[in-house]
Image: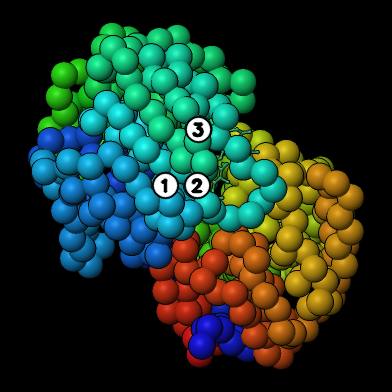
């Protein structure tokens, strides 16, 4: 029987919440642990289905990993396999991060096209052409991708990405830390999770500079060692809970946050009339009497632009704002799949290609809706908290890929969400 979330909405929310660790940091860092010949202790790791998938992949490569609360320990000293079965590759998009890590550690790998949220086509052409530049021979046969390195070790190279892809940047870094010579990545993605990955690799002895900027320089080392590292807070989960308070009305103290990294989101949310007081590692927020629409278009862009991952949750909040807000989705082709469910709950949203026009309505109402992807699913939970009556959300395995115990977080804020 598939689980559902039952939300009774329409209630003001109030309370304190400790923000979970970042999924999009934890996954590449777990792949990176393959590069360290020793034990890596990763603290603040969220307990999520995608993290368990990463741990299964590590197991199949001959590594040991174990969980204790939010600490995962990975020991890669006995890693002996460079093949990931197709069913594990399909479980999530981040399985592709193991390509760079396996090339660094084992100097070869066999993978297939990764799965992940359906947000439109999500090719891996940039990942493959970047590693080719580093001396990797890539052949694709019968759905399998086989990578070999004739020279025996990845070679440092100058790589200019056609677009600052997060995943491609991470894969190049993973492949380059144990490469022969220096690698320069131009037009690199600048997302905070890339800095977190590089921070972890530096703690293992890697030589990386420039992360967080568009030009990253990696000088290859012979070996990396294990380390203890704390994964950064999840800025998108943070954006989700702030959107929740904006939508339902109320106040929140969000603890263990990364306020500076959340600034592109916070500066937009502030325009809705919410009072937001970010301190270094916590954020206090109080909603206004009535949410105001955002007057200039909200354009999703690579960091430090407005994050595509926060588009859906903010849209849920703005569907009950005073006035009309406009979104422009520039990162993915098909990232408005949550709008049908929001409309079923009474929202007034029109989608035209990459544009969504959201006319705020007075109230949303409960309905039976289905999550079709991770952040779109979270947006339904946000809308449900603001809606009058009961909302039943199905397809919640999508939500569980990114949110640790979402129903407990709702309850802690005084909301009413049950898992059945
Ligand atoms: C990461 O995906 C995140 N995932 C996504 O979060 C996030 O939405 C995205 O970055 C953008 O910020 C993880 O970190 C695990 P990209 P990624 O490569 O690396 C195109 C979530 O909800 N592209 O920056 O896959 C691609 O199709 C997830 O947590 C190519 O064309 O994103 C997309 O249009 C969803 N060829 C654009 O670039 C390639 O080889 C940006 O993708 C690679 C990407």
Closest to the observer: 224 or 308? Answer: 224
Count neighbours of disc 2 (C-alpha within 10 A) and say few if under 14, some if 14 to 19, many if 20 or more.
many
Mark 3, ligand 1, within 8 Å: the answer is: no
Q: Residue at x 60, y 85 (%)?
A: 7
Q: Quadrant of residue 306?
A: top right
At 61% from the left and 67% from the top, the residue drawn is 377
Is any atom of residue 225 visible in this view? yes
User: Disc 1 vs disc 3: Cβ atoms closer than 8 Å?
Assistant: no
Q: Is mark 2 within 8 Å of ligand 1?
A: no
Of marks 2 and 3, the one in the foreground: 3
Q: Is the residue 28 above or below the residue 278 in the image?
A: above
What whole-number distance in Å separates the C-alpha atoms at marks 2 and 3?
Answer: 14 Å
Q: Which residue is mark 3?
A: 140
Task: In this rendered view, identify the residue nearer to me: 272 or 174.
Answer: 174
Query: Mark 2 or 3 closer to N-term?
Result: 2
Residue 329, x across and y down, in percent: 74, 44
Residue at x-position 32% and y-position 43%? 83
Point out residue 168 in the picture as x, y percentages from the top left corner.
49, 30
Query: Is residue 149 or residue 369 the one in the foreground?
Result: 149
Give the residue number, with chain letter if any, for mark 1: 95
Q: Residue 6, relative to residue 109: is it above or below?
A: below
Question: Measuring 73% from the left and 39% from the top, which residue is drawn there?
Answer: 330
Frontmost residue, 373 versus 136: 136
Disc 3: CA contacts within 10 A as few (<14), some (14-19) or many (>=20): few
Whichever of callouts 2 and 1 sits on the residue coming sooner in the sequence is: 1
Q: Position of residue 85 (x, y in %)?
A: 37, 51
Q: Are marks 2 and 1 in contact (CB under 8 Å)?
A: yes
Place of residue 271 in the rendered image (x, y in percent of width and height, measured from the top left): 72, 51
Residue under numbered circle 2: 114
Q: Residues within 10 Å of mark 1 (few under 14, many from 20)?
A: many
């Amino acid at each position: 029987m598939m689980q559902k979330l039952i939300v009774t909405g329409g209630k003001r929310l109030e309370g304190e919440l400790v923000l979970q660790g970042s999924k999009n940091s934890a996954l590449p860092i777990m792949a990176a642990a393959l590069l360290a010949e020793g034990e890596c202790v990763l603290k603040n790791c969220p307990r999520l289905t995608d993290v368990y998938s990463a741990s299964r992949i590590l197991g199949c490569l001959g590594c040991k990993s174990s969980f204790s609360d939010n600490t995962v320990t990975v020991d890669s000293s006995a890693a002996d396999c460079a093949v990931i079965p197709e069913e594990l590759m399909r479980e999530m998009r981040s399985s592709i991060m193991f390509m760079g890590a396996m090339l660094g550690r084992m100097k070869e790998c066999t993978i297939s096209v990764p799965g992940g949220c359906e947000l439109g086509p999500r090719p891996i052409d940039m990942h493959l052409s970047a590693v080719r530049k580093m001396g990797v021979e890539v052949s694709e046969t019968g759905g399998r991708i086989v990578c070999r390195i004739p020279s025996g070790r990845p070679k440092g190279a100058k790589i200019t990405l056609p677009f600052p892809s997060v995943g491609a940047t991470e894969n190049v870094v993973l492949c380059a830390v144990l490469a022969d010579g220096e690698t320069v990545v131009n037009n690199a993605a600048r997302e905070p999770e890339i800095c977190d990955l590089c921070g972890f690799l530096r703690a293992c002895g890697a030589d990386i500079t420039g992360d967080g900027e568009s030009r990253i320089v990696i000088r290859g080392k012979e070996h990396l060692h294990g380390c203890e590292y704390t994964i950064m807070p999840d800025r998108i989960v943070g954006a989700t809970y702030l959107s929740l308070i904006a939508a339902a009305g109320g106040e929140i103290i969000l603890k263990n946050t990364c306020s500076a990294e959340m600034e592109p989101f916070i500066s937009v949310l502030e325009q809705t009339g919410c009072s937001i007081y970010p301190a270094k590692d916590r954020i206090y927020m109080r909603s206004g009497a009535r949410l105001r629409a955002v007057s200039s278009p909200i354009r999703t862009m690579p960091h430090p632009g407005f994050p595509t991952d926060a588009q859906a949750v903010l849209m849920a909040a703005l569907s009950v704002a005073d006035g009309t807000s406009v979104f422009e989705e520039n990162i993915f082709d098909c990232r408005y799949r949550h709008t049908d469910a929001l409309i079923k709950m009474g929202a007034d949203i029109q989608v035209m290609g990459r544009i969504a026009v959201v006319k705020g309505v007075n109230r949303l109402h409960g309905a039976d809706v289905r999550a079709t992807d991770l952040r779109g699913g979270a947006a339904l939970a946000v809308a449900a908290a603001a809606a009058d009556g009961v909302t039943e959300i199905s397809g919640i395995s999508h939500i569980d890929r990114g949110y640790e115990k979402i129903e407990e977080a709702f309850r802690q804020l005084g909301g009413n969400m049950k898992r059945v």
